[in-house]
Image (tube, rainbow, N blue to C red):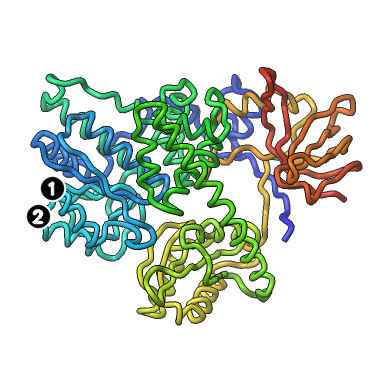
Amino acid sequence: MQPSIRRRTVIARDALPSSLHPVVRRIYAQRGMVSESELSLELKTLLAPQGLLGIHGACDELAAAVTGGARICVVGDYDADGATGVALAVSALRAFGAARVDYLVPSRFTQGYGLSPALADAANEGGAQVLITVDNGIASVSGVARAKALGMRVIITDHHLAGPVLPAADAIVNPNQPGCAFSSKCLAGVGVMFYLLSALRAKLRDAGWFTARPEPRLADWLDLVAVGTVADVVRLDHNNRILVAQGLARIRARRARPGILALLTVAGRAIESVSSTDLGFAVGPRLNAAGRLDDMGLGIECLLSTDDASAMAIARQLDSMNRERREIEAQMRDEALAMVESLTATTVGVALFDPAWHEGVVGLVASRIKDKLNRPTIAFARAQEAGLLKGSARSIAGLHIRDALAAVDAAAPGLLGRYGGHAMAAGLSLAESRLDEFSERFDAVCRAQLDAAALERVLETDGELGAPELVLDTAQALEQAGPWGQGFPEPLFDGTFEVVQGRVVGERHAKYRLRGPDPRRTIEAIHFGGAATLVDGGAVTVAYRLGINRWQGSESAELKIEHLTAP
């Protein structure tokens, strides 16, 4: 399905200062900015922690644990948000003076997501007296009950949507729990943990705890917060943009963890000009590869490493895992693409399964098919438990995927096993024998909620750039105007150009020299993965990002083509 191009409309730009680069001013207005205050990305403009429901109780629990020398166990998730959140909690609590801080992350394949009763047993066997979750726990009713029965104190920090029953924890911090008035509902799991630690540090300071030990600078952990926030694809509202911008500034200044610098290095990214895109497409996937194929503990140890040599050694292992993950994903993606050829034109909710698919990679396959079809998609693999499937779901605008699963569950009680997630992504389990029934019910829910307009593939662009704007100065201004990400997308432009030269580079990519609005000038362009649609001559319409090509110390403007069509 070829996408159509739709240009964003400008709501208002008069409230934004005229000192901004004119293209940046236009882009900000198209992102809905209506006040100059939204331009500030200084830490002092962050929302205050006190707005989070439950944070005072959580601080009391943690302060007692730190000052009382209790053994603390951090329970994380096996994705990049969970890994960065665990690394943040462990390293910061140790720096605060906690006597013993360990961590546990469940195996994706044998234990599943979140704080389960089995994981509570494992923490107890390790001597934990206080459990604190990060990026999970809001749905861990039985796991929390088990931990409490074993005598542990339990603090939940999470950002996922709550189910009908909250766990009976000693404290819960989650901006999306019922009754929480915190205005930024988009914090990632690592962001929630950062807020809790910020409030905890203030409490310990007031109690005089830091008179006998150095008081840590929480800003020193913002590199972890930036990576987890971008990798989890949460909405970059103003609050999250502050967190990411501050983390990026520290990474560019090489004031980041050795593990993050090593992951960027093995990915071939330039530290001094690292962007949110690099965090999302270079650091995040390499961390996630550990959780997808093996044990996220390797990713966490990379982030906890304090010396360059050990961090680089682990980063190389993660890079190798990521290459293996890409090979597995490519095969599964091709198989999935062959499956969708047989779907009927009326299918809206897509459910795919192959007995040989890898459980850790189905989420990526679901995402690829969702992008291609613009349909909510769930990809399933066989679980370790006989007869059970585990699925990973990805959605499109207009369908809240967790709510869609809840609707299926309400219509057919017992059909689903465990499920949870948020608007755009979710996970679930069900019996393999009931996959056909689930597929029909899921499709029916999707058809009821999505009309033809919602199913149309659309590329939203920021319009055209004129000849005076297709220059390095504009590209530099746009780069500095970030961070860009979910809900605050990187600028995408469209226009018609004449192909002066087109050639294949690196087997899969297309390299172009284009002539645009000014017939006297040409501009270089790259279309990653575009070799199959190479055009050598004539006019083309492209949707593109205006980027910077850095080579041997020089910089030039370059179009990064997202979509190309020839008349």
Residue positioned 55% across, 71% down in the render? 354
Q: Amino acid at mark 2?
A: Gly
The disc, 2 or 1, on the residue closer to the chain's N-terminal end is 1
Question: Is residue 264 depicted above or below 52 in this figure?
Answer: above
Which residue position holds label 1?
129
Report which quarter residue 220 is drawn in: top left
Measuring 49% from the left and 56% from the top, which residue is drawn there?
424
- Answer yes or no: is residue 554 visible: yes
Helix, strand or loop at mark 2: loop
Callout 1: helix, strand or loop?
loop
Apparent side of residue 20 relative to residue 92 in the rendered image (left or right): right
Name the residue located 11 percent from the left edge and 58 percent from the top edge: 150
**Vertical order, 546 against 184 (above or below):** above
Q: Height in image: 257 above or below 450?
A: above
In the rendered image, the quadrant that contains the N terminus is bottom right
In the image, taking residue 342 as reference, residue 135 lies left or right, namely: left
Q: Write down the quadrant of residue 550 in the picture.
A: top right
Q: Residue furthest right?
A: 538
Relative image position of residue 353 (x, y in whole percent): 54, 71
State how far apart marks 2 and 1 are (Cα).
Answer: 7 Å
Q: Nearer the viewer, residue 201 or 80?
A: 80
Label 2 crowd (10 A; few <14 / some 14-19 / many >=20): few
Q: Are marks 2 and 1 in contact (CB under 8 Å)?
A: yes
Q: Considering depth in this image, is 238 or 90 the residue closer to the camera?
A: 90
Q: Which residue is mark 2?
A: 151
